Image (spheres, coloured by chain):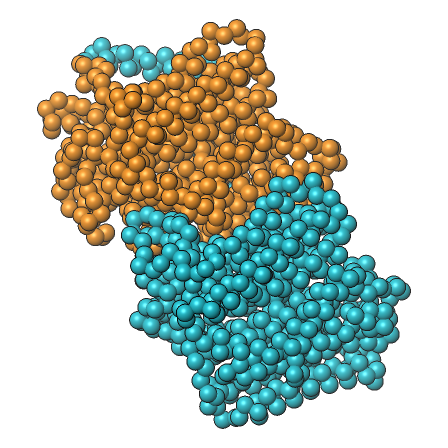
Amino acid sequence: MNDFPWLTAVTFAPLAGALALALFPSRAANLHRLWTLLVTVVVFGVSVGMFAAYEGGAAGFQLVERATWVESLNFQYILGVDGISVFLVLLTTFLMPVAVLASWRVDRQVKSFMIAFLVLETAMLGTFVALDLLLFFLFFEALLFPMYLIIGGWGSERRAYAAVKFFLFTMAGSAFLFVAILFLYFRSGSALGTPTFDLTQLANVPLSASAGRWLFLGFFVAFAVKVPLFPLHTWLPDAHTEAPTAGSVVLAAVLLKIGAYGLIRFNLSLFPEASMYFRTFVLVLAVIGILYGAIVALIQTDVKRLVAYSSVSHLGFVVLGIFAFSVEAMTGGVLQMVNHGLSTGALFLLVGMLYERTHTRDLTKMGGLSQTMPILAGVFLFTALSSIGLPGLNGFVGEFLVLLGTFAVSKPFASVAVAGVVLAAIYLLWAYQRAMHGELRNAEHATLPDLNGRERVLLAPVLAAILLIGVFPRPFLDEIEPSAEVSVACVRGRGTGGELLSLAPNHLCTGTIDQLGPLP
Amino acid sequence: MVIGADLPAINSAMPIWIVPLFPLTGALVLLLTGRRWRGLLSGWFASFLVGASFVSTIVLLLDFLGGDGEAALVNRLYQWVAAGSFSVDVAFRVDPLALVMALTVSGVATLIHIYSIDYMRGDPRFARFFAYLNLFVFFMLVLVLANNFLLLFVGWEGVGLCSYLLIGFWFERKPAADAAKKAFIVTRIGDSAFLIGIVFIWLRFQSLDFEVVFARAPELAAGTATVLALLLFAGAVGKSAQLPLHTWLPDAMEGPTPVSALIHAATMVTAGVYLVVRAHPIFEASEVALTIVATVGIVTAIYAGLSAIGQDDIKRMLAYSTISQLGFMFFGAGMGAYSAAIFLLVAHAFFKAMLFLGAGSVMHGLRGETDMMRMGGLRRAMPLTFWTWVIGWLAMAGIPPLSGFFAKDQVVASASENGRLWFWIAALVGSLLTAVYMSRATFMTFFGRPRSEQKPHDAPPRMGLALVVLAAAAAFGGILGLSAVNGILPAFLEPVFGAAEEPHGPLTVLALALASSAVAVVGIGIAYLVYGSGRIDWVALRSRFAGAKRASQRGFYVDDVYTGGLVAPAKLGSAFLAYVFDRRVLDGAVNGLGRIIGAFAGRGRAVQTGRVRSYALAVLLGVVGVLSYLVVRF
């Protein structure tokens, strides 16, 4: 099965499922739900097969598929995964069935909703596996439409404002990205003979320092909006608040990761010198994000906005890990991307379940819910603790590695970032207390049902993953680390030496940690 | 590369992880099946598992004593976290210090579990209480049996979580929920420094394993050692409720009383002392750090002693007394008297757990009453509670030959033996305060005439059992350390701390002991005069010195300063950022930009009409159009 096109299969299976779903009779809502669930479960199965075919512990891209799509443009269809993207693919396919199950109560235009979801899945997976810049850009843009529809079509009161804001922010970012990609494309024509969008070749294109910096910024703006980095984050609380539960889950768990992933995959490998140049700038933004997101989260009364701002803070940790340029921090940052997907995904699921019962997101109208829903409360606390970074759960491993790796290269940034660890405990435990502890504030809440069978089934795998990564993170770290090492070695080796390391096929560069130049 | 890979994977006959496994099993079973348990069975189940932990710790002790004299038994399970050059194992370690801690923890915990069966009887969340209690014991055992700093930190945060869950066990009551959150957050401030300390240790030693780190700690430059030691100490200050992070512990008394006894007196709060003592090679590399530890300890001891005198709530009085006694332990550690500090830790676990359980028995008999102003004369109605309390009281006050006398005397004497007379005098002042506030509470509670109408009853059998066993331990525990030089405990701990030095201060051991005892007697005498003799109208005295009384009762307003000076401004700042800066400035800029663009395009209205799909379709068509144009053109 070595020649099986695993990545194409994983990426386009949801789209095929969506096309088939389009042919279904439009009134059989349960059939639409079941079909979508089946498709997403099968996709997860295929992705597990993909992971089995992936050779562990190696750096460089694997399962690479190449085909020329548009000859005249030299636009190629190149897919491949490394130890970083492989887990983002798995995270996506793992959470999609969960999100579908969480959307069981959606009863308006179920078919369109499910189609949008499946199309979204293909677009998300595509961004993680595409190694051709134009192909990546197409997937990156294709994300917008289904997400826009999901927020705008099935969201709450201010959905139109939120959807348009989401759309315009991302579009504005991708305009810069598109220009930068085209510039690189034409530059590669003069440097390599034929212009190309192939990432592994583009990494070899010599750029002047100023060109590299401008291009870095073009990519950076697009990804910083997605992450989101302070001060480009203001679309996120609105989008999260207005999106339906599954939309928030996918938005937090996967979409934000595309930004962080893009920074590693494109900014660091294409513009190592500029990455070095802007390093302190990005680290400052990351640390501001950690503190700012946490401080603003403190005072929120809308629980969805609170979790949204906590994402700003947590993603700050991820970016801190990426731009620390140390192997430990990078590995921790990538693991933290997965962790945040699981923890914040689960938090949004739980908030959705709370909303379905209480019809409010307002913490001041909740209170004492632990009395009527002890299991939901317990699961909420478990998830919050994973987000707080309690050792033994997933968040701690990533956070610790980020702190360790950052401290090794820059003590001030790590020391400030650690305040985020304290603040996370404050805003999450306070939120938990306001919702779950105390007397029942609303008499109608006395009869609310606890988690039902479907909800337990959809939460169980996420909680299990949270615990597994906390107790035994090796299977994850062992795959992430070699790719993280290459990323760090490339950016530090090439970024400081100004010298290109040799390029092997399917590798961005063949750096090892021994070739690291000192950080300025 | 596995650091320390040259060490054998296991060199103990019985795997060490068995010890924490028992309560973990109990916790998981009870959490997952909590509501199916009927009656008191879940309580017995949990008690049995903790008892099994205690027994298996004894097996480990025998194993260790029968071994061929290794300094430690180490049991590596698997590599936990590894990335780049970093690597840390899940590995357990048994050495004399770990054994003393594990025996104390599992032993006291077993008794408190049994006590709780009576105390918590009839609570609707009975099984969950024992699940949390078992989970706590699991994490506490992980803390004391860990072989490296990161695994220790797992236990460290885990006990903090259980403390949170148990303080807030009656979460319907806002004070309980508030106290739980406060405990978690205040300790986490210290923990974040501790975490940085762990990172620092890794960078300095490329290992987190105790053997490796401590073997090389003497190489540390004094400045580095000071920073490192103080980072660790910050964690200890939070966990062990020392100044300035002590404010959570009095509030933590909102939890059920067995929790106060186990977590907030006997075990968890002593984790900070354990950390300092465990990491003593790092502290010893810095004279400054040791002096700071001793100073924080003695200042806290005196501060908390003064606060304890003003408490009317019996549990808050005991809480301040715990803070004060922990201060003594840090003082001992700072003086380099590690085995004396551990001795006091163990003795304190006995007598303070006993006193808390006694207070619980009083509350149980008085339908939850905690205000000593409404007690009095209880010695007749509750003889068992009274007589066990007397032992705990005199042990804590430091009357020979009870355990507290030997332990505290050795800690106090260590200052004189180091030739630091001012520290010694301060410690004597602390001892005097201890005797005063404990005797005051005793006279107010058990002597005089009853100040309430209630008809109290004495402790039921299972509670009584725990009281008697702990009282016996508090009475005879002194046997463990009759001499600071060659007592049982100091001799056993010698491989960890090195041989204790012969005292060389200006005063002889006997003189020091006499001074300690005299101070205790004077303290009891003062309290008797005011509260017990009947010659002084102490109720009138309270109103004459109302200001001082109030200051003492409020812990000299430290908490109020934090609330006014830190919490309120933080909330204000947060509200400013959230509602003004984020909404108006950042988002305002975006919306303004959007409006300008909208005006230019003349479509501002259409965008907001909610015709989302036609708009999306238009954009999709646009992108497809642009791309087709590109493809065709090339």
| Residue at x-position 70% and y-position 43% | B37
Residue B463 lies in what quarter of the image?
bottom right
Q: Colour of chain A?
A: orange
Along the line of sight, the residue nearer the viewer: B610 or B502: B502
Does B64 sit left or right of B120 as displayed? left
Percent across and percent down for residue B515 are 61, 89
Along the line of sight, the residue nearer the viewer: A22 or B382: B382
Residue A5 lies in what quarter of the image?
top left
Percent across and percent down for residue A435 are 63, 41
Image vertical order of residue A128 relative to residue B64, above or below? above
Does B527 sit left or right of A500 as displayed? right
Does A399 sit left or right of A129 as displayed? right
Q: Colour of chain B?
A: cyan
Percent across and percent down for residue A36 are 49, 18
Q: Is residue B93 visible?
A: no
| Residue at x-position 53% and y-position 73% | B342
Q: Is residue B68 visible?
A: yes
Does A159 sit left or right of A448 as displayed? left
Along the line of sight, the residue nearer the viewer: B43 or A484: B43
Percent across and percent down for residue B388 are 74, 72
| Residue at x-position 64% and y-position 55% | B48
Q: Which quadrant holds the N terminus of chain A?
A: top left
| Residue at x-position 38% and y-position 56% | B9
Q: How many marks?
A: 0
